[in-house]
Image (cartoon, helix red, strand yellow):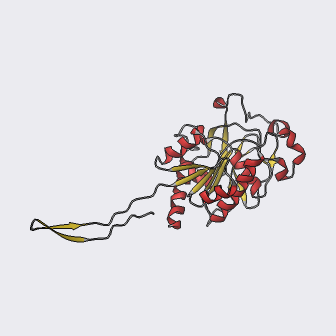
């Protein structure tokens, strides 16, 4: 909590022979949460603000690493957002680079941000690429191209992503299931890569019907900072969906707790 404190005070002012007494009471003003986006867009900003309209959002995309890390230190949480493929060499599949559209500069920045946010024990949320790069940064691997390497009965990427949906099943007892209050749900999707081998200490929290990992979290979340990542795009979904706004609410609640600890 950020407090602007006004001490109790009494002042006696003599004006035209009159004594005026002024008493000041102690008040507290909450500091708005500050949430970083690894790369922002209106969809992500709107999703955060639907959870809390007062949140200050900082877009770190394209910043020099040193500058981004300084700004991150003043934030209360970070969202790693969707975008390009992670360079395959980072997870031992460099020969598959021709099958990917990458952004090495963004990878370098986000790996540094992930390392620092974990060190700070800051709440972290990942969406699509955000889930993938979190898994790679923590030591996991990815399926390079789902249609070619893991063909199935689910379409994970469409030309018109606004009409690309499929169902997911949440793992019983997962933090994601607890947060959403759901066992299954429909999600909007737009990706051709996915988690293959979860990183050490990470577990899969949701699956699609063709056995693609749809969410990851800490294997043992007790006493760990908030970390949740999903393959779908909750920022594009109906806020009434249990797999959209409840996730943001939980994330912002963790950010508020983190902010209090900093103060």
> Where's residue 226, x and y in %?
61, 58
Displayed quadrant of residue 209: top right
Q: Nearer the viewer, residue 203 or 95?
A: 95
- Left/right placement of residue 43 relative to residue 24 reads right
> Where's residue 91, x and y in %?
83, 52
Query: In this view, which residue lies farthest toward the left?
Result: 17
Q: For the image shown, how many numbered marks are present on the structure?
A: 0
Residue found at x 63% / y 40%: 233
Q: Nearer the viewer, residue 79 or 128?
A: 79
Residue found at x 75% / y 50%: 107
Q: Is residue 151 above or below residue 24?
A: above
> Where's residue 136, x and y in %?
77, 53
Please indicate, yes or no, whether residue 173 appears anywhere in the rendered image: no
- Left/right placement of residue 52 relative to residue 142 reads left
Displayed quadrant of residue 103: top right
Q: Is residue 83 above or below residue 202?
A: above
Q: Nearer the viewer, residue 199 or 206?
A: 199
Please indicate, yes or no, whether residue 78 appears anywhere in the rendered image: yes
Residue found at x 45% / y 58%: 31
- Left/right placement of residue 245 relative to residue 69 reads left
Quadrant holding the N terminus: bottom left
> Where's residue 106, x and y in %?
72, 48
């Amino acid at each position: 909590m950020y407090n602007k404190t006004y001490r109790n005070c009494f002042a006696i002012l003599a004006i035209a022979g009159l004594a005026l007494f002024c008493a000041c009471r102690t008040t507290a003003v909450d500091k708005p949460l500050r949430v970083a986006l690894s790369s922002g867009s209106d969809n992500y900003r709107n999703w955060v603000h639907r959870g809390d309209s007062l949140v200050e959002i900082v877009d770190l995309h394209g910043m020099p690493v040193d500058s981004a890390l300084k700004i991150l230190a003043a934030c209360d949480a970070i969202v790693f957002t969707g975008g390009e493929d992670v360079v395959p060499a980072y997870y031992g599949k460099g020969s598959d680079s021709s099958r990917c559209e990458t952004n090495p500069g963004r990878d370098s920045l986000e790996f540094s941000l992930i390392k620092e946010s974990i060190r700070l024990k800051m709440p972290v949320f990942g969406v699509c690429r955000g889930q993938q790069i979190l898994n790679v940064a923590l030591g996991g691997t990815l399926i390079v191209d789902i249609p070619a390497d893991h063909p199935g009965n689910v379409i994970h990427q469409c030309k018109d992503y606004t009409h690309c949906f499929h169902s997911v099943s949440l793992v019983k007892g997962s933090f994601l299931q607890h947060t959403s209050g759901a066992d299954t749900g429909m999600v909007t999707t737009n990706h051709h890569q996915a988690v293959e081998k979860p990183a050490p200490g990470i577990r899969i929290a949701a699956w699609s019907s063709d056995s693609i990992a749809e969410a990851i979290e800490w294997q043992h979340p007790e006493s760990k900072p908030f970390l949740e990542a999903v393959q779908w795009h909750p920022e594009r979904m109906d806020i009434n969906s249990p797999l959209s706004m409840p996730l943001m609410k939980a994330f912002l609640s963790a950010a508020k707790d983190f902010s209090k600890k900093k103060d």
